[in-house]
Image (cartoon, rainbow, N blue to C red):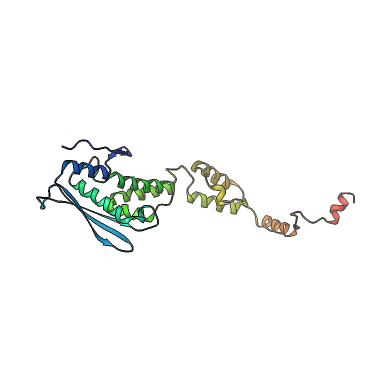
Amino acid sequence: MPKKLPTISIKGKDYVMVKDRILAFNELYPKGRIITEIIKNDELSVVCKARVYPDVSNLDRAFTGHSEAYRGNGQMGQVPVEVAETSAVGRALAMMGIGIVDSIASADEIKKANGLIENARTGQPSSVIDYQDVAENMPQALPRINDAKKEYKRGTYTGLATEKQKDLIINLCLQKGVKATREELDGLKISEASRKIKSLSEMPSKTKSQEQAEDAFEEELDDDGAPPITEEDLRNAGL
C-alpha cells in the first residue's frame, strides 16, 4: 500500500494534487509508464488523453483519463496544452486508485469549481474559460454553481439588497418625487431595502400640479440657480 499522500482541505474535504499523485505512482510502480496524447488542438481548445501503465511488460492493463482545456486570456487559457495534460494525467491516476480520498477529482479541479461557486454567490464575474473547463471535467459542480447564482439574486448569501428590490425603490422614488440614483443603493442590506420600500409606499405620491409648479419654478431659475428678482421682492425689501 502507498504511504498516505499529502492533501489539501477544501470545504471540509481532503483532495490530493496531481503532482503528488504522479510522485506516488513513480515510487510505487518503477516499471510503470505515463503516456499522454493530444487528440484535439484547434483555435478553441485542447483535448488530452492520458494512459497509465503500472507495468510496461503488461500493456493490456492500462488506465485512461481525458481532459479538455479552452484557450483564452486568463492564466490557464494561455497554457491550454499544459492544463489539459495535467488534468488528464490526474484523472488517469485516479482511475487507478491513486490519490482518491473523498473524490476522484484532484485538488486543482476542486479549487477551480469552488472559485466559480464563490463568484456566483457574490455576483463576481468568472472566466468563461474556467467555467467551460469545470463543465467538461466536473459537470457535477454545475448545479451548485447555478444554485449559487440564485442565492446571489435572492441576496441570501451576501445579505445585500436584490436587484428586484433596487428596481422597486427607484420606481417608488420616481412616483413620490424623491431623488435617488442606483449608485446610492449599492451596499444596501435586504432589511434596509425592505424598510425603505415600506416607507416610500406610505408616502403620498406627487400630484400633477406639484410637478407642474416645480417645472415652472425650474424654468425661471437664472444661471446662478436662484429665481430672478421681481418688483415685489424689491418693495418687500424696502428698495
Left or right side of 96 for 181: right
Q: In this view, does 27 lie above or below 170?
A: above
Q: Which residue lies furthest to the right in this view?
A: 239
Residue 185 spot, x, y in % from top left? 54, 47
Corner quadrant of residue 231: bottom right
Q: Residue furthest front?
A: 30
Residue 154 spot, x, y in % from top left? 43, 47
Left or right side of 18 for 29: left
Which residue appears at 72% of the width and 60% of the height?
219
Residue 146 spot, x, y in % from top left? 36, 50
- 114 or 179: nearer the viewer: 114
Residue 112 spot, x, y in % from top left? 34, 48
- Which quadrant holds the N terminus? top left
Count the numbered circles shown. 0
Left or right side of 161 for 14: left
Corner quadrant of residue 132: bottom left
| Residue 230 in view | yes
Corner quadrant of residue 128: bottom left
Left or right side of 167 for 127: left
Q: Residue furthest top?
A: 4
Which residue appears at 42% of the width and 47% of the height?
152
| Residue 99 in view | no
